[in-house]
Image (cartoon, helix red, strand yellow):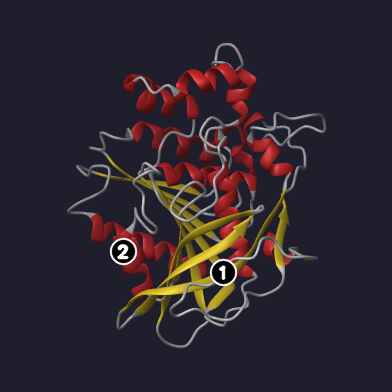
């Protein structure tokens, strides 16, 4: 059963968000989208669900047990108008935090299916709202999708979460879940809350993996584009440790190394919970990617497939991390995938 069929309205509102001064709409719908993820047991180690006992509060099982909320989607300033869509600054609420972003709404008669976009790593100190996937935002809106690009917590105009980095940025998963719930309960006639897809690039691809195992059934389909490793310790060893990032010592002091605390590191890898996946997943990765090795995607696809899941890996010969000559053709593939599952 799809989670959207069981979501309920909870009493009360989260924090109020003020509208932008230009192009704003009326107050957001007064309902709060909620979803509680399943914790049913499964005998397969790769289909593990949280046990009935205590779980580490910094873990995917902890997110699985949480009742997630998303609401208060508000359109603020009009950032751009094209013949195909209008681009707005937006905010929404996710588990008690205000998260900013941008939204492209197509011209014409809706409701339109929606896509949540999860961007890759950009230093929050230099990040600006909507940064990270401009080509995809434009093209998908021109193809008739409402596009909500989340900034994540600690970015742009979003609320701060000071522990997010040392806690392996699991808060970004909450922000994406909140985005889907806010879309579903927005009450806006342009948005079809029963047809929502997820598209993440690089670090955002890792957020896609986490979201799919934490909240199975929330989205209809998902694409991970040049994703990071589904094993957080590999990302630390690849990106942070060689640069002498002081955050590594803080992470290991708080959570232990993989050798000291293997249970913690299993609990933050979505591969441990591969059997929870319910959505079709497309992974696209260039073979010449020197930022995120394609071997990471090969392992993720293999683990999901061995768990009996609909996960496809499409490798693109010669393409690097951001895709160049093959970008348009691979977006054709991405759009065809979403067309099959969202139209």
**Residue labelled with disc 2:** 332
At 63% across and 29% down in the image, what residue appears?
267
The correct choice, above or below, for 333 with respect to 152 in the image is below
Q: Please name the residue shown 75% across and 42% down the image.
A: 39
Work out which residue is located at the far left of the displayed protein and give it: 325
Which class describes the residues within 10 Å of circle 1: few (<14), some (14-19), or many (20+)?
Answer: few
**Rendered-image quadrant of the N terminus:** bottom right
The picture places residue 109, in percent across and down from the top left corner, at 47, 88
Q: Would residue 343 be visible to someone looking at this image?
A: no
The CA span between labels 2 and 1 is 38 Å
Instruction: For label 2, count other residues whose C-alpha is less than 10 Å away and answer few (under 14), some (14-19) or many (20+).
Output: few
Number of the label disc, if any, that sits on residue 18: 1
Query: In the figure, 327 relative to 335: above or below?
Result: above
- Please, what secondary structure does the residue beneath circle 2 have? helix
Q: Which residue: 44% across, 46% down?
A: 204
On the image, the x and y values in percent for residue 131 come to: 35, 55
């Amino acid at each position: 059963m799809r989670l959207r069929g069981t979501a309920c309205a909870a009493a009360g509102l989260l924090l109020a968000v003020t509208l932008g001064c230009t192009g704003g709409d009326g107050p957001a719908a007064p309902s709060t989208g909620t979803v509680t993820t399943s914790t049913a047991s499964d005998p397969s180690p790769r289909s593990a669900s949280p046990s009935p006992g205590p779980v580490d509060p910094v873990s995917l099982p902890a997110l699985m047990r949480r009742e997630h909320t998303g609401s208060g989607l508000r359109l603020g300033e009009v950032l751009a108008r094209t013949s195909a869509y209008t681009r707005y600054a937006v905010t929404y609420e996710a588990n008690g935090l205000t998260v900013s972003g941008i939204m492209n709404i197509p011209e014409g008669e809706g409701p339109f299916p929606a896509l949540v976009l999860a961007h890759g790593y950009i230093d929050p100190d230099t990040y600006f709202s909507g940064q990270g996937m401009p080509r995809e935002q434009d093209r998908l809106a021109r193809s008739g999708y409402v596009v909500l690009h989340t900034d994540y917590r600690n970015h742009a105009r979003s609320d701060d979460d000071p522990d997010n980095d040392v806690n392996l940025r699991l808060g970004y998963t909450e922000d994406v879940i909140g985005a889907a719930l806010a879309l579903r309960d927005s009450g806006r006639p342009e948005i079809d809350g029963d047809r929502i897809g997820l598209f993440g690039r690089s670090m955002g691809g890792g957020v896609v993996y986490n979201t799919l195992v934490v909240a199975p059934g929330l989205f209809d389909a998902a694409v991970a584009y040049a994703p990071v490793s589904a094993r957080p310790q590999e990302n630390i060893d690849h990106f942070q440790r060689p640069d002498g990032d002081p955050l590594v010592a803080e992470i290991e002091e708080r959570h232990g190394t993989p050798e000291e605390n293997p249970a913690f590191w299993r609990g933050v890898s979505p591969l441990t919970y591969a059997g929870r996946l319910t959505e079709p997943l497309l992974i696209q990765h260039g073979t010449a990617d020197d930022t995120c090795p394609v071997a990471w995607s090969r392992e993720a696809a293999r683990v999901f497939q061995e768990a009996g899941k609909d996960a496809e890996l499409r490798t693109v010969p010669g393409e690097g991390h951001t895709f160049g000559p093959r970008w348009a053709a691979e977006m054709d593939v991405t759009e065809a995938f979403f067309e099959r599952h969202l139209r």
